[in-house]
Each structure stands twice: as C-alpha cells, then as structure tokens.
Image (spheres, grey):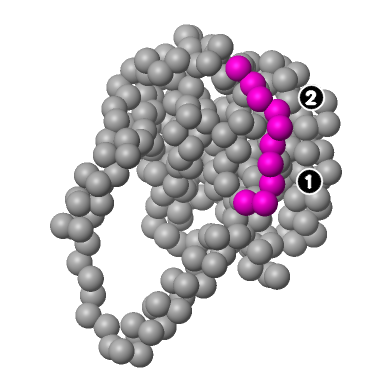
C-alpha cells in the first residue's frame, strides 16, 4: 500500500507570506463550544510544558519537549485533576469525536474536504510500506538477550499493544480536520497533514513530528498556533488519553 510519509510530505518552504491559516475561520467552523474546548486544550498544553520544562520561553520549552521525544526520554508529570477536567470538557463539547474515534463509535457528519484541498503538494512523494520495512530490516540490530529478558520484553510489548488497541484513532471525516482544511490558504504543511489523516488515514508518529519540527522550524514557527495544533493533537492529547487508559 502507498502512503504519504510524514517527512516527505511536509514542504517547510518557510514562505510565510503565502502560507496562512486563519484561526477565526477555524474556530467559526468548529463552533463556539468546540472552539472554546480547543483553546482550553491549548492552554492545558502550555501548562503541561511549564510543569515539565523550566526554560523561560515557550519556544525553548517546546524544543526540550520535542528533544525528549526524539531521544525517547519521556517521563512526564501530569496534573491529574487538570487532565481529567480537560478530557471531560472535550467529551462534553463533542470535540474529541471530531478529532478521534474509538472502535465502537460512528460519525455521521460528512464534509467537502476536496473543496479546500488538492494533492499537488510541493516536494510530496509516495513511498511503499514494504520499502520502509525492508530498510528497517537491514538497519536494526537485534540485541542478544537471555530467555528471562526475552520473556519480559515480550510481556512489555504485549502490554503496550493492549494500550494501543484501546486508543481512539483519527476521525478521517472529523469536523476538526475540515475546519483546519477550510482555514488554510495555500499552507502546504497543513494541507499535507490534513490529507495524511483524511485521505490516507495515517497518523504521524511523535518521533517524526519531533524530528521534522526541530530540523525545520524557527522559534517563532514553533509557537505558531497551527504548528502547536499538530503537537497538541498528535502528541499531547494522545498522551493524556493513554495516561487515563493506563490508570484504569
């Protein structure tokens, strides 16, 4: 199967004058309650960064956050009351369903994504899953482990898989992604992200986002609301939900 591979899709052309995402259009399309819920999620993310990273500026905290993801050094502290309150608000507003759906959920709304998106994205390439997997087979060295270590590793992987199976998946028909598509004006990175989710039903990994953002975005771009949105939805929100699942 062909997919859009995250780092191939993002153009990072830095043509700020021609790449705009109108937050007012985004919020109007979401509706007042859902737009408010998203703004609270954004504030929650910034509070989370303050709790876990002690640099004085938001860009530096974001860089540390992304660097930890890149280095797989994840030992975050959550404000449990704030996290639960935030997730409850997302549920009550209906915004969570516009972003992520659990396996047993259906979603009736349909939007004309094609009206605001095209697939002619600069520097975009398609790549075959099998090509990726073949490359990994050549590069990854499997360490020698004892029987006891091997059993423990398998158990840990099974535990992780059980959590992954319970996690909601991106809602390819979601109003959230439609609002983002409608709000962008020739913003190739945002168009690519929305296409990735809505057409190719792929969710970019945290490590790919971290590498792409650290390598290509300036401090001012890291705190641009549309770039924060990708970090919030694909990393922060999913980590909140995962943390709640683990507690249960």
Quadrant (top left/top right/bottom left/bottom right) for the N terminus: top left
In the rendered image of this protein, does residue 20 appear above or below residue 78? above
Which residue sits at x=28%, y=88%? Answer: 146
Q: Overall secondary structure of the magenta stretch?
A: loop
Is residue 198 toward the left or the right of residue 50 in the image?
left
Q: Which residue is mark 1?
A: 91
Coordinates of residue 202 in the picture (x, y in percent): 46, 40
In the rendered image of this protein, does residue 93 appear above or below residue 69? above
Q: Which mark is residue 31?
A: 2
Is residue 239 toward the left or the right of residue 153 in the image?
right
Calculate the distance from the C-alpha at mark 1 to the C-alpha at mark 2. 15 Å
Point out the residue furthest to the top here.
18
Earlier in the chain: of badge 1 and badge 2, it is: 2
Coordinates of residue 92 in the picture (x, y in percent): 83, 43
Which residue sits at x=35%, y=90%? Answer: 148
The answer, for residue 228, to whether it is visible in the render is: no
The image quadrant of residue 127 is top left
Q: Which mark is residue 5?
A: none
Assign a secondary structure to mark 1: helix
Query: Which stretch is magenta?
Result: 103-112
Circle 2: is it few (<14), some (14-19), or many (20+) Cα within 10 Å?
some
Assign a secondary structure to mark 2: loop
Which residue sits at x=23%, y=75%? Answer: 143
Quadrant (top left/top right/bottom left/bottom right) for the C terminus: bottom right
Q: Residue 67 or 236: which is nearer the viewer? A: 236
């Amino acid at each position: 199967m062909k997919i859009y591979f995250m780092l191939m899709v993002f153009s990072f052309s830095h043509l700020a004058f021609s790449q705009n995402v109108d937050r007012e259009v985004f919020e109007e399309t979401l509706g007042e309650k859902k737009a408010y819920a998203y703004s609270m999620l954004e504030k929650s993310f910034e509070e989370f960064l303050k709790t876990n990273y002690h640099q004085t500026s938001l860009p530096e905290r974001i860089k540390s956050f992304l660097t930890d993801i890149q280095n797989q050094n994840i030992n975050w502290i959550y404000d449990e009351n704030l996290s639960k309150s935030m997730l409850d608000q997302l549920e009550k507003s209906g915004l969570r369903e516009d972003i992520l759906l659990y396996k047993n959920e259906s979603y009736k709304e349909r939007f004309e994504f094609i009206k605001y998106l095209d697939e002619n994205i600069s520097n975009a390439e398609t790549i075959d899953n099998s090509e990726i997997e073949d490359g990994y087979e050549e590069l990854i060295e499997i360490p020698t482990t004892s029987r006891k270590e091997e059993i423990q590793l398998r158990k840990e992987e099974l535990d992780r898989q059980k959590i992954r199976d319970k996690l909601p998946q991106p809602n390819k028909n979601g109003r959230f992604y439609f609002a983002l598509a409608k709000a962008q004006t020739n913003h190739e990175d945002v168009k690519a992200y929305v296409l990735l989710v809505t057409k190719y039903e792929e969710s970019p990994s945290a490590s790919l986002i971290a590498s792409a953002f650290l390598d290509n975005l300036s401090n001012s771009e890291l705190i641009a609301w549309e770039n924060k949105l990708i970090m919030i939805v694909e990393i922060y929100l999913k980590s909140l939900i995962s943390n709640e699942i683990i507690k249960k």
